[in-house]
Structures are given as structure tokens and as C-alpha cells.
Image: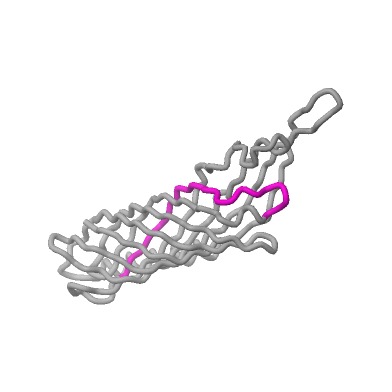
Amino acid sequence: MKNIITFLSLFICTLSYGQKSKNFKPYYSNNLNLGIGLGISDAYTDTDFILVGNFDYVGLFHLNPKIAVGAGIGFRQYANFGAGNKSDVLSLGAINNYFVPLYLHARFRFIKRKVSPYLNFSFGYNNYVGSNAEKVDFYEDSNYPLTDYKLNSGWMTNASLGVSINLKNRKSILFGPYLEYFRSKERVDVSIYEETKFSSRLVSDSKTYNFIDVLQLGLKVGFSF
């Protein structure tokens, strides 16, 4: 809740500052970003390494030459390479979880030049949309036929610092490192065949893990137009 209040306060301050700028007509820009990052998550005493692919679209209102605010939508692919260490019944190797984040966004430029540094801040909600582990027989074993593993939706925040190369007609190329934090909850559902004297039946063994923190560091390249 404190993070939301802080971001909204920053959002309002940028609006006020932008209105004081003279001889500048506010305008709207489209922003596309591609990135890749390496994340680390913790669950119980385990540590997982996660490769994250990023795509984002951000719509920004430029209040003055140095400040822009708006909102964005994106796509995240979390490839979890450590899921197999969770328990004896889950040994799946790499698992992909897919998310669509929705967030508020603010961009700050420090100087108005051909090549200039920038600072981005985002805060929003990362929405789970699917996983390649859903109802798949990873073991190829009749004892553990179906396994469903996923990371739940949760709050996220992002900060990036980079360089902007300004082109003609208010177009620019941006690139630089980013840091993203995602608060999630890990869940594993395993279906097991229970053998009887004359037959077998499918029994669901549901396991829910505690909240986990995913912190990733990576690089992004973007185009603004």
C-alpha cells in the first residue's frame, strides 16, 4: 500500500511540474521495448534461477522536455530452471510461466541533447495467463501422470537507467539495464495414481508454497515514436 501511495504522489508531482513549463506543447508517444533478464527467486530454503523474456508497450504523455507519465502493458515469460528442486515429487527441469503486466509508468530525462540519459519507474500488477507445465506428464511414469506448476499473479515494480538517442520527429532509441521485482506465490498440483488390488485411481495431491520474491536484472532496448 505504501508503494502505491508513493508512486501516486510522484505521479501527481510530475503533473504539477509539467504544467509550469512554458513554450512546450505536451504530446503523446508510443514506446516499444524488448528485454531479457536473469532472475533469482526464493521459496522456502531453495533458490531458483529464472530467465525472463520481456516485451512492453507504454503510452506516454510528455508534460515537458524532461518528464513523461503514462501506462503500459507487456508480456513476461519466466523460464524457471530450478523448479525440480522443490520436492521429491516435482522434478520438471525448466518450466515456463506467462504473465501480462499492467502498470503506471514515469520517465525522466536529465538533459535535452542528441544523446541523453533517462530514468524510468513502473509500478503495477503482473497477471498470470498460463504455463507450459499445466497437466503434462513430465515423468513419463504411471505413478506421477499429471503435474501442474505455476506462479500466481502479484504486484511488481521496475526501475531502469539508460541512454536515449534522439532522432528526428520526436523519435528515439533507448537502451540500458533494468531491475524488476515481482511478488508471487508458488503452487504445485500433482495427480498420483493410487494402486489397489484390482484397479488404480487418480488422486490429486495439491501443494501450495509460500509467497516468493523474484528479483531480476537485465537489459532492454526500446523505440519511441
For the residue pair 46 and 161, the one nearer the viewer reads as 46
Q: Position of residue 106 (x, y in %)?
A: 36, 63
Magenta portion: prevailing SS class: strand
Q: On the rendered image, what quadrant is the N terminus found in?
A: bottom right
Q: Nearer the viewer, residue 6 or 181?
A: 181
In the picture as drawn, the residue positioned furthest to the top comes out as 198
Question: Given the current orientation, which residue lies at the most extreme front position?
Answer: 140
Identify the residue at horizontal 52%, vertical 48% (top origin).
Answer: 97
Taking 205 as reference, is 126 above or below it? below
Q: Is residue 143 above or below residue 118?
A: above
Q: Residue at x 24, y 63 (%)?
A: 173
Which residues lie in the magenta part? 86-108
Location of residue 221 (image quadrant): bottom left
Quick check: can you spot residue 12? no
Q: Is residue 102 above or below residue 137?
A: below
Work out whether residue 194 or residue 111 is closer to the camera in this orientation and state it: 194
Q: Position of residue 222 (x, y in %)?
A: 29, 60
Residue 36 location in percent, x, y? Answer: 41, 59
State the scheme by which the image is colored: one colour
Q: How many marks?
A: 0
Residue 180 lies in the magenta-colored region: no
Quadrant in the picture for the C terminus: bottom left
Residue 105: in magenta span: yes
Which residue appears farthest toward the left when viewing the image? 168
Can residue 32 be seen by looking at this rendering? yes
Rendered location of residue 15, percent (x, y):
32, 64
At 58% from the left edge and 55% from the top edge, which residue is drawn?
Answer: 184
Q: In the orientation shown, which residue stands out farthest toward the bottom?
A: 111
